[in-house]
Amino acid sequence: MPHPKKKTTRGTGGQRRSHDHLTTVNTSSCPKCNEPKLAHKACPSCGFYKENKVINTEKATERILRKSSAKTTAVEEKPVKEEEKKEAVTEEKAAK
Ligand SMILES: [Zn+2]
């Protein structure tokens, strides 16, 4: 069986793990609704990409609600959760 010859010190392990960090995702603001969105991607909140509506956001939210309701069977709680998400996004925006 292969076996390490010497103990790996905290410093050596730390040097190895120095690149194991998460990087921040760069977001730009949507020109339509001013919500943060990824570059070269359609805006998830309004569904627009370069002045064209490419995502039917109403249908997408319906689909999400249907998927989540299948798991929990509590449909009434879902709109509240969406509002919480929007609030969280605005708080992030305010922090920046
Ligand atoms: Zn938008």
Image (cartoon, rainbow, N blue to C red):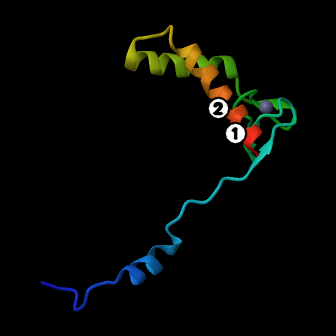
Q: What's the residue type where badge 1 is placed?
A: Glu
Residue extending farthest top = 76
The image position of residue 89, as x and y in percent, is 68, 34
The image position of residue 28, as x and y in percent, is 79, 46
Secondary structure at numbered mark 2:
helix
The image position of residue 14, as x and y in percent, is 44, 77
| Along the line of sight, the residue nearer the viewer: 52 or 14 | 14
Report the side of 13 relative to 21 (left or right). left
Badge 1 is on which residue? Answer: 92
Residue extending farthest bottom = 5
| Along the line of sight, the residue nearer the viewer: 69 or 59 | 69
Q: Is residue 60 visible?
A: no
The image position of residue 35, as x and y in percent, is 77, 34
Residue 93, placed above or below residue 23:
above
- Label 1 environment density (alpha carbons within 10 Å; few <14, some 14–19, many ≥20): few
Residue extending farthest left = 1
The CB of the residue at mark 1 lies under 8 Å from ligand 1: no
- Label 2 environment density (alpha carbons within 10 Å; few <14, some 14–19, many ≥20): few
Which labelled disc corresponds to residue 88? 2
Residue 72, placed above or below residue 23:
above
Which of the 4 quarters of the picture holds residue 46? top right
Q: Is residue 42 visible?
A: yes
Q: What's the residue type where badge 2 is placed?
A: Ala
The quadrant the N terminus occupies is bottom left
Q: Quadrant of ligand 1?
A: top right
Q: Are marks 2 and 1 in contact (CB under 8 Å)?
A: yes
Secondary structure at numbered mark 1:
helix
Residue 65, placed above or below residue 47:
above
The residue at 75%/39% (across/down) is 93
Residue 71, placed above or below residue 10:
above
